[in-house]
Amino acid sequence: MTPTVIEEAAKPLERALCIEGGFALSGEVGIGGSKNASLPIIAATLLAAQGETRLIGVPRISDVEVMCDILRGLGAQVAWNGDVLDISCRQIRSTEVDAELGQKIRASTYLFGALLARLGEAKVPYPGGDRIGARPIDFHLAGLRSMGVYITTESGCLLGKGRPQESSFYLERPSVGATINLMMAATLGHDHHTTTLSNASMEPEILDVARFLSAMGARIYGAGTPTIKVVAVSHLTGATYEVIPDRLEAGTFLMTAAASGGDVTVTGVISEHLTAVVAKLQQMGVVVEVFGDSIRARARGRLRATDVLAEEYPGFPTDLQPCIAALLTTADGESLVTDLVWTDRFQYTDEFLRMGGQVKVTGSSVRIHGVSQLTSAEVTANEIRGGAALVLASLGARGTSTIYGVHHLDRGYAGLIDKLIGLGAHIDELPIPT
Ligand code: EPU
């Protein structure tokens, strides 16, 4: 099969991926900037009433484009200059997030905290995003209410009034989104009040957002630990900032080596962000070596079954739970994969069944009996990481699989297909007439 790539400009809205399995991927792949750091960082640019922001390393994925469009709708100037994203939020003319755009991405919730801090009012639609089970935002709202914000709902939108004040807020459980939203909301105030967040999330993306806010002049202490203190400052100024590499993209590419029996090196990563992933792959019999900001993964024989517990950082990431499950479908023995963060994130398992996988979901776990090889099938991605899992499954399967729902992959992975083809994957992109 001759690999073909559809030119970016000519790409139809929807397309299917045809992946011929059985080719060992090898070579080096550069990892782009983190999606889950970039989205809140772009939202946080709203806090800067002065100066311009220049962001380096933001991935050109559809979720980012939606966030940029939302900012433009609020009056911000947002422009790509090559790979650099320039944003000026000096003049914001609206505090109402476009309902249609806001519903498309989960990260639109970040605009609630940012707009309240900057302008004292906000209207944001209840967020959309991936279908991975219930996604409440009660911690965000309780935290903002504890800061004195008056919140109501109207026609599917959240309405907030009042500038966030001093507060001590305990998160019932660590939430990445709530930690970031409340941290942003607490940054501004003329009285230098202090907000304390306890039981905060410790994901690297939290620290990255805090570093960006600090570069804009914010005073944030303890980000990356369970207790974060934010001392309000009178104003923030735009800054130049480079986002961290995407540990989830890196983990996915390390797993392509295991899925295809190959030898893949990811470059430009922060290795310590991948400690849990490296340990788990090694336990499964993959040879993984860390060299500074590069990690090499080499498959050696059949993978060994293992149990996986997806949980908050520094545990094994939920966003790689579907991907590691894909690898375990052909491992030697029985595995149990449990997700403590998104307890229903197992929609992808129906697609594994079509490929001959032996998987059974019980509660928040999937039990996997490894088979010697999956077989190709027509399958559909339902969310970003479930889609990546189907790509991994197809790389190792016998025959050519067709994956639908590719727009989910476009939401989270920049240039995924080109990168896979660069490593030797046999992939065709077929336009689906709309
Ligand atoms: N939770 C609540 N109430 C809240 C907020 C969260 O009960 O108000 C619960 C959730 O139901 C979940 C847990 O707390 O069980 C953790 O959710 P969290 O708030 O941490 O998730 P999030 O901020 O909505 C981000 C990422 C997800 C990633 C999770 C966990 C973004 C845009 N999304 O979501 O990424 O899975 O953190 O690390 O950053 C992805 O990239 O594919 C993705 C889904």
Image: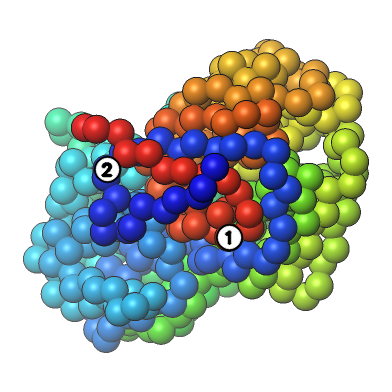
Q: Residues within 10 Å of mark 2 (few under 14, many from 20)?
A: few
**Does the CB distance between marks 1 and 2 fall below 8 Å?**
no
Q: In the drawing, what numbered circle is on residue 13?
A: 2
Q: Residue 90, percent across and down?
A: 19, 78
Residue 367 visible in rendering: yes
Q: Residue 249, position in %: x, y?
A: 58, 55
Percent x, y for residue 206?
54, 61
Q: Picture quarter containing residue 331? A: top right
Q: Is mark 1 within 8 Å of ligand 1?
A: no
Q: CA distance from mark 1 to mark 2?
A: 23 Å
> In the image, is residue 144 above or below residue 90?
above
Q: Dot 2 lies on which element? A: loop
Q: Would you name the residue on which mark 1 appears? A: 422
Residue at 24% x, 32% y: name it.
Answer: 433
- Type of residue at label 2? Leu
In the shown orientation, is residue 389 left or right of residue 191? Answer: right
Which of the 4 quarters of the picture holds residue 350?
top right
